[in-house]
Amino acid sequence: MAHYLGIDVGTSGTKTLLIDETGNVIAEANAEYPMEQPKPGWTQQDPEDWWTATKKTVRAVMKKSGVEKADVKAIGLSGQMHGSVFLDRDDKVIRPAILWNDQRTSEQCEQITSAAGSREKLISMVANPALTGFQAPKILWMRDNEKRNFGNLAKVLLPKDDIRRRLIGDYVTEVSDASGTLLLDVKNRNWSKTLLSKLDLSEDLLPRVVESEDVTGTLTSEAAKALGLTTDCKVVGGAGDCAAGAIGNGIVKKGLLSTSIGTSGVMFVHSDEPSVDASGRLHTFCHAVRGKWHMMGVNLTSGGSLQWWVDQVVQGLAGIHAAKRFEAATQEAEKAVAGSGGMLFLPYLNGERTPHADPNARGAFVGMNLTHDRAAMTRSVMEGITFALRDSLEIIESLGVPVRQIRASGGGSKNVFWRQMQADVFGKKITTLKVEQGPAFGVALLAAVGDGAYKNIAQACQATIEVAAETKADRSAKKTYDKLFPVYQSLYGSLKDDMHQLAELQSTP
């Protein structure tokens, strides 16, 4: 039987899984690696860590599964979006990769907007405004601040596509991940020659672009040896982690939306047409479904805010092992009332993307009084994260994009309390899948399509993905959240100037 690998190069680690041609997960493995933060707002990683983790997890999966290497027919690649791997002419990494949540490029975003002629003209070219996380401003940052490095620059790759380079010996990306560079003509699904010219950047710096299910090559002999596979093994385009996760959740047709709470939070909705939010609050990207698009709202520190709260603040849970503090904290939060007694949390701990696009936004508790305890504060953190996702949902629906079903994934889907909170805050049913494996599963399905096991990705999802349960909104809690949400929405505008002053103080040595 044919088998397919899905490799997801994430921010905290790489996950690899193996499926058979019916979609059953045979084995999986994870490997973690560090993230550097040399300055406030800066995030970097060593691409060599991704490659080491890829080799380790593929070999672990093959050993666990007992599957013959000749039976692994294709590999799908996913990865953290927007990151920049800078290579010289000898394919040597020039400097640490700058990641999706790095905030150093606000000046370069202004340069891009100016070069395009206006924010509106930029959105008309590439469907999105210039944001600090995107790849294009990172390239300009290097040109402005590391002139020697830029002089040696021959190629810029996204994280998963640097793994592809090591696998097939070629420079290739695909439309969903390329959409997040800010250099792709999203409507026409190819590089924007117009914007590249205005930025004085050569298209030669970029890899060629394909559709997500297209075969991009086969393993080199060196890569096959490193992974314990064969040179007949194909590598398909794959997808950026958001699109890959959506594929893994079956978000491949109109009316379906996925909500994912990991380090970041994502609201992802399928679109048959390239619908563009003219104000740039939402991203419009190419989907990993051939000839389709998606709209996406992103919150930079969703699960990351709760992780911060548990790791850095809630360390006083006496007798609780560190690995169990998250569970203990959320169980404690259940004891607090919906709305946390009128206390709100803004989850802008590392700036924000949707809807504010503000790298200098900062987090805050608002409305605290002497009756509030640790349980209420934990619940408020979770509610603030969920309100941030509702921001995206409301914009999506205001643009006339139908949302008939919401499928939850990531950490927010695994916690029963948080699933209920999402249903209450959104005022909609939340569905979960029988098996939820995220981006790695999505790109494994793309690999199966690329190998011919399925006619297309919609057919693959229909055959392999099954809804398991529904969580309905509680009317009383929904009523409370509907009252609080407008207050939550107003707080950013009220505090913006103060946030920016504090951010400036924080960045001063």
Image (cartoon, grey):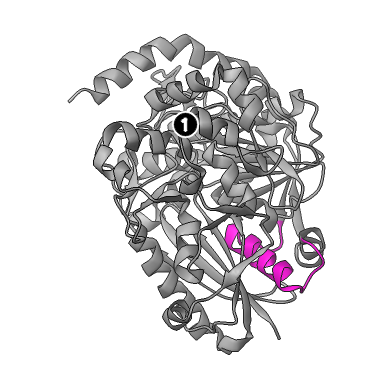
Q: Does the image show residue 121?
A: yes
Please indicate whether residue 253 sits to the left or right of residue 59 in the image: right
Q: Is residue 102 magenta?
A: no
At x 76% / y 46%, what residue is drawn?
Answer: 292
At x 56% / y 36%, what residue is drawn?
Answer: 298
Q: Position of residue 374 (x, y in %)?
A: 40, 34
At x 38% / y 30%, what residue is drawn?
Answer: 105
Under mark 1, the amino acid is Ala
At label 1, counting other C-alpha atoms closer than 10 Å, the crowd grade (few under 14, some 14-19, many 20 or more) is: many
| Residue placed under numbered mark 1 in the picture | 376
Q: Does the image show residue 337?
A: no
User: Which contiguous range is marked in magenta?
Assistant: 433-456
Q: Position of residue 165 (x, y in %)?
A: 47, 64
Can you say which quadrant of the picture contains the C terminus? Answer: top left
Along the line of sight, which residue is nearer the eye, 275 or 395?
Answer: 275
Q: Is residue 3 depicted above or below 158 in this figure?
A: below
Q: Is residue 435 magenta?
A: yes
Q: Is residue 291 depicted above or below 393 in this figure?
A: below
Q: Is residue 136 depicted above or below 9 in this figure?
A: above
Q: How many marks?
A: 1
Please indicate whether residue 236 sits to the left or right of residue 369 in the image: right
Can you say which quadrant of the picture contains the N terminus? Answer: bottom right
Q: Position of residue 274 (x, y in %)?
A: 74, 36
Along the line of sight, which residue is nearer the eye, 108 or 198?
Answer: 198
At x 47% / y 30%, what residue is drawn?
Answer: 199
Q: Position of residue 457 (x, y in %)?
A: 76, 60
Q: Secondary structure at mark 1?
A: helix
Q: Quadrant of residue 278?
A: top right
Please indicate whether residue 89 sits to the left or right of residue 451 in the image: left
Q: Residue furthest left?
A: 509
Q: Quadrant of residue 437?
A: bottom right
